[in-house]
Amino acid sequence: MFKKGSKLYSIFNNKCPRCHDGDFYVDKNPFHLKNILTIHDKCDKCGLKYMMEPSFYHGAMYVSYGLSVATSIATFIILTLIGMDLMWRFIGVVIALIVLTPFMLKLSRIIYINMFVSFEEKIGDGGRELEDGSRMSED
Ligand SMILES: [Zn+2]
C-alpha cells in the first residue's frame, strides 16, 4: 500500500523505522490483548534499539490522545451525516473508541518512534557497510 522508505510503510506494516525490514511488535494482531504492547528489544535486521531511553514511550500518550480525538470527531461527523440522534451519536463515539483503542495504542508507539528515527536505505540489507568493508554493529 505504501512504498518502502516512507514513514507510513513502517507505521502500517509494523516495521522497524530505520531499515523497514525488521518487525517492531512481537504480535501484529491488536486484539491479542495479552501482549498488545510487547515490542522487540531491538531490530533483528539493523540492530536499532527500540527502547531508546528509559520511559521512551511515555511520549506516545500524546500521540494516542490525538488519535482518540480524531477518531471521536470523525465518528461523530459520520453518524451526523447518516442522520442519527444526538444520543446515538455519543453512544457510537464511545463504541468506536472502545473497539479502536487497541489499534490506537499500537499505532501511537510506532508513530512516536517514527518521529525520532528516519529511514536509512543502506542499512536495510543487513548492516551498515563501513569504508574498510567491515560491518558496523550497534548495541
Ligand atoms: Zn531495523
Image: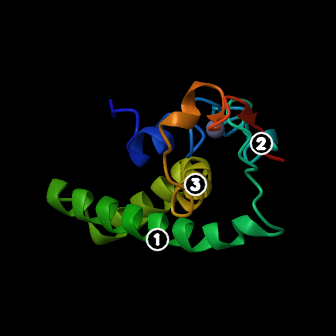
Amino acid type of the residue tagged 3 in the rendering: Thr
Name the disc covering residue 42, or none.
2
Circle 3: element type = helix
Circle 2: element type = loop
Q: Find out whether the residues at labels 3 and 2 contact each other: C-beta distance under 8 Å.
A: no
Task: Using the numbered discs, state the Cα–Cα distance from disc 1 to disc 2 in whole angstroms.
Answer: 27 Å
Q: Find out whether the residues at labels 1 and 2 contact each other: C-beta distance under 8 Å.
A: no
Along the line of sight, the residue nearer the viewer: 107 or 115: 115
Amino acid type of the residue tagged 1 in the rendering: Gly
Res 61 seen here:
yes
Residue 136, picture quadrant:
top right
Q: Residue at x 81, y 40 (%)?
A: 34
Q: Residue at x 54, y 51 (%)?
A: 107
Amino acid type of the residue tagged 2 in the rendering: Lys
Residue 7: image location, x then y, percent: 42, 48
- Please indicate whether residue 78 sits to the left or right of residue 136 in the image: left
Considering only vertical position in the picture, is 53 above or below 51? below
The mark that comes first in sequence, 3 or 2, is 2
Residue 68: image location, x then y, percent: 48, 66
Residue under pointer 1 = 66
The mark that comes first in sequence, 1 or 2, is 2
Q: Find out whether the residues at labels 1 and 3 contact each other: C-beta distance under 8 Å.
A: no
Residue under pointer 3 = 101
Q: Residue furthest front?
A: 132
Residue 24: image location, x then y, percent: 66, 39
Q: How many marks?
A: 3
Q: Nearer the viewer, mark 3 or mark 2?
A: 2
Along the line of sight, the residue nearer the viewer: 139 or 116: 139
Residue 127, picture quadrant:
top right
Res 30 seen here:
no
Task: Using the numbered discs, state the Cα–Cα distance from disc 3 to disc 2 in whole angstroms.
Answer: 25 Å
Mark 2 is surrounded, within 10 Å at the Cα level, by few (under 14), some (14 to 19) or many (20 or more) other residues, namely some
